[in-house]
C-alpha cells in the first residue's frame, strides 16, 4: 500500500500539531526558577546577598493538588522576602475563586516578609460596605490572615544601620490630589475606594523616605511595568513625584504569553506603547532593563489570561518564578 505525497505531508503536519500540543500542555504545567543578580550602586553590606522571591500573574492556575508542585519549588528556595506583584485571581471567572492562591500561601514555609500588590484581574483592595464605609475586601482579609501583607505604602526592613524600603510604586508618585497618568489602568478608581483620611496618611509615609540616607535602598512593587516614556514623564512633570528608586519589580506582560522562535512576543497589554503593545520592543517585555538610572525587573509570571478560553494558555513561554539576589555594584 502506498500513501500519496499529499496525504503523507498532511499526516506529518497532524503529527507535528499533536506533538506541539502535548509539549505545550506539559510546558504550561511546569515551573522554572529564573535567577538574576541585581547590582545596586552603594548597596549596604547588610543587604549584600539579600534574596527576593517574586511570584506574579498566577491567574488562579493550579499546579497540582493544593499547589503541591509549585510549593515544592518555592519551599526549596532560601529567600529573605517574597513579593506577589498582582493578578493572583482570574478576571474571566464567573465567581472569584481564592483557593488556589490561598493554598499557595498556606503551604509556604517562609512568610517572614511577604508582601502583595494587586493587579487588574484581582479584587479591589477595598470595598464600600453597607454603612458606606471603606473596608478591606474579603479576599485581602483572607490573604492577610494567612500571613501575606497588603503593601499600601511603605514596608521597611531594618538591618543594623541600613534600611530597605518596599513601596507601592503607584501610590508613591502621586501627589495629594491623586494625579494619575492617563492610560494607567484606572488607578484613580482604585484609590478612591480608600478612606480619604487614611489615604492621606499613607501618602505622608513616603515623605519619611524621600530624603533617604546612603544606607537606604528603595524597591517599588507594581503590577504594571513602567515604560520608559512614563519614567520620563514622572521625572519631568512637577505634578508627579518620582522617587529615587534602586529597583522596580513588575509583572502583567506574561512575557507576551505567546512567544515565537527567533522573534519573541508579538503582543503585550501595554496601552502606553504605540499600537497598544502590538509588536513591542523585545528588550522591554521581560527581565531586567534600566532607564534614567532606574532598574526594573519584569517577570513573565505563572499563568495566562484572555477573553477566549481556548487561547488561555502560554506558548513557548514556560511559567516562572523569579529569584533575585541584590549585589553591590562596585565602581
Image (cartoon, helix red, strand yellow):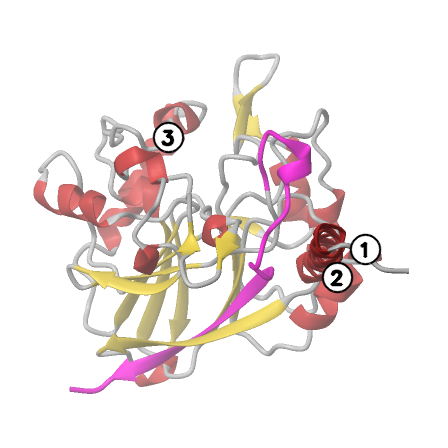
Q: Which quadrant of the figure has residue 131?
A: top right
Look at discs 1 and 2 and give the one toward the viewer: 1
According to the picture, the residue beneath numbered tag 1 turns out to be: 66
Disc 1 vs disc 2: Cβ atoms closer than 8 Å? Answer: yes
Q: Is residue 283 left or right of residue 152?
A: left
Above or below residue 312? Residue 322 is: below
Alpha carbon distance from label 3 to label 1: 32 Å
Q: Is residue 312 magenta?
A: yes
Are there few (<14), some (14-19), or many (20+) residues within 10 Å of tag 3? some
Residue under label 3 = 187
Which tag, 1 or 2, sits closer to the chain's start? Answer: 1
Q: Which residues are magenta?
A: 305-331
Residue 186 placement (x, y as % from top left): 38, 26
For image coordinates 30% across by 29% down, the residue present is: 183
Mark closer to the chain start, 2 or 3: 2
Q: Quadrant of the N terminus?
A: bottom right
Amino acid at each position: 500500500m502506498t500513501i500519496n505525497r499529499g496525504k503523507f505531508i498532511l499526516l506529518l503536519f497532524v503529527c507535528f500539531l499533536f506533538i506541539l500540543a502535548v509539549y505545550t500542555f506539559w510546558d504550561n504545567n511546569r515551573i522554572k526558577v529564573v535567577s538574576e543578580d541585581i547590582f545596586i550602586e552603594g548597596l549596604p553590606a547588610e543587604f549584600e546577598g539579600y534574596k527576593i522571591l517574586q511570584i506574579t500573574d498566577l491567574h488562579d492556575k493550579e499546579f497540582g493538588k493544593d499547589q503541591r508542585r509549585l510549593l515544592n519549588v518555592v519551599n526549596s528556595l532560601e529567600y529573605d522576602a517574597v513579593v506577589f506583584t498582582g493578578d493572583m485571581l482570574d478576571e474571566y471567572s464567573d465567581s472569584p475563586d481564592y483557593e488556589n492562591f490561598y493554598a499557595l500561601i498556606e503551604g509556604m514555609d517562609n512568610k517572614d516578609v511577604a508582601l502583595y500588590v494587586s493587579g487588574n484581574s484581582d479584587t479591589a483592595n477595598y470595598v464600600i460596605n453597607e454603612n458606606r464605609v471603606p473596608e478591606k475586601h474579603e479576599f485581602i482579609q483572607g490573604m492577610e490572615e494567612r500571613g501575606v501583607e497588603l503593601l499600601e505604602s511603605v514596608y521597611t526592613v531594618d538591618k543594623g544601620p541600613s534600611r530597605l524600603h518596599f513601596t507601592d510604586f503607584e501610590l508613591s508618585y502621586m501627589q495629594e490630589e491623586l494625579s494619575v497618568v492617563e492610560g494607567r489602568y484606572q488607578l484613580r478608581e482604585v484609590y478612591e475606594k480608600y478612606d480619604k483620611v487614611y489615604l492621606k496618611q499613607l501618602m505622608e509615609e513616603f515623605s519619611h523616605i524621600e530624603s533617604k540616607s546612603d544606607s537606604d535602598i528603595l524597591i517599588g512593587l507594581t503590577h504594571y511595568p513602567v515604560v520608559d516614556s512614563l519614567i520620563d514623564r514622572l521625572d519631568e512633570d512637577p505634578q508627579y513625584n518620582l522617587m529615587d528608586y534602586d529597583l522596580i519589580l513588575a509583572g502583567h506582560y506574561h512575557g507576551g504569553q505567546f512567544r515565537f522562535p527567533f522573534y519573541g512576543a508579538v503582543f503585550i497589554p501595554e496601552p502606553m506603547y504605540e499600537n497598544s503593545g502590538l509588536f513591542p520592543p523585545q528588550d522591554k517585555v521581560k527581565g531586567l532593563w534600566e532607564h534614567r538610572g532606574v532598574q526594573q525587573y519584569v517577570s513573565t509570571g505563572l499563568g495566562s489570561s484572555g477573553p477566549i478560553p481556548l487561547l488561555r494558555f502560554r506558548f513557548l513561554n514556560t511559567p516562572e518564578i523569579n529569584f533575585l539576589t541584590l549585589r553591590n555594584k562596585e565602581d
